[in-house]
Image (tube, helix red, strand yellow):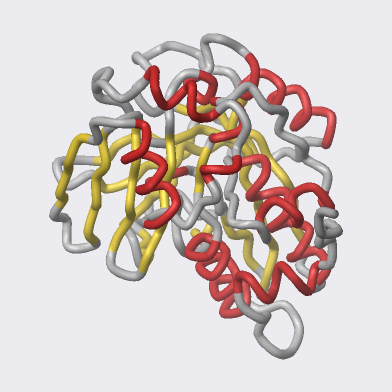
Amino acid sequence: MSAAPNTSIDAYFDLVGQPAPGGPSLAGLARLQLGHIMAIPFENLNPLAGLTVPLDIPALLDKFTHRRGGYCFEHNLLYRHALDTLGYRTTPLLARVRVNAAPGVVTPRTHMLLLVEVEGERWLSDTGFGKATPTAPLRLVPGEAQSTPHGVYRLVPEGDAGDSFLLETDAGDGWAPLYAFESRPAYPVDFEMSNWYVSTHPASHFTRDLIAVRTVANGRHVLHNARYSFYAVDGTATRKELATPAALVHLLENTFGLAAGSVPGLGAKLSEIVSPRGEGFER
């Protein structure tokens, strides 16, 4: 008989770290955001294997507490649930991903993030943007370079309304665009629609490419198809290619901490991608 699903929010805090004592605070928000990102990997094994991606809280709790991760909707919906439980004021948003997008191209709203109001200010807080996920809250002010444990970011205003921003990261040789968003709220039906698209559409890279990211104190482990990379916080990077499905499963299990061997249908997909298929951005 299989074990009963673990649907208690206490299990989430056991996984990511207990919340700071007292009421909502910026320090408590930063602690929970970093703890979440370092405890729960970013990955797309379900859509790659042709499996559904449920977004209800019990399903997310059960998945994350059984050595699995997910992508933005999964991460940020559960993260928001935890913040709301702790009394934070959160607003869920949708963003248009600008990574690798040609100038002038309008991309769909396929990324979820949060605005959190705490200590009299608004902060961008995101736990699900792959290898470029900010590991600390970002103050919602334009043009200010903001350091996090894993990189420097800034928000650039877009348009004339004053509520639209482009998030950029310092790529070493200049600022690189990540995603654009407006500060108006999105709703569960919006996330369901976007989640359905990114998890099922044949043009979605989540249905075609193997992507996994695990953040650790000194950098990020990144897997994109058969290429494994480690991006250190000092700016150095190491890379290697994996040649067999077994090597990919071993890496997913041991370096990323994922129960990859138990994902139905994943083995066949890994067999298709053991050869490198070009560069991409591991989101």
User: Residue at point 33% right, 45% down?
Assistant: 222
Q: Nearer the viewer, residue 52 or 150?
A: 52
Instruction: Between residue 279 and residue 255, name the one nearer to us.
Output: 255
- The picture quadrant where one finds residue 45 is top right
| x and y, in percent, of residue 228 in the image | 27, 41
Does residue 159 show up? no
Which residue corresponds to the image point at 73% horizontal and 54% vertical from the top-left?
A: 78
- Above or below, 201 relative to 237: above
Image spot of residue 76 (x, y percent): 66, 49
Residue under the point 59% across and 59% down: 123
Which residue is at a point 26% across and 48% down the rendered structure image? 170
Position above or below: 187 against 104: below
Q: Quadrant of residue 113?
A: top right
Q: Quadrant of the N terminus?
A: bottom right
Q: Could you say where residue 43 lies in the image, as x and y percent from the top left?
A: 51, 41
Question: Which residue ends up furthest to the bottom in the rendered image?
Answer: 21
Residue furthest toward the front? 1
Which residue is at the front of the view, 202 or 234? 202
Q: Is residue 21 above or below residue 4?
A: below
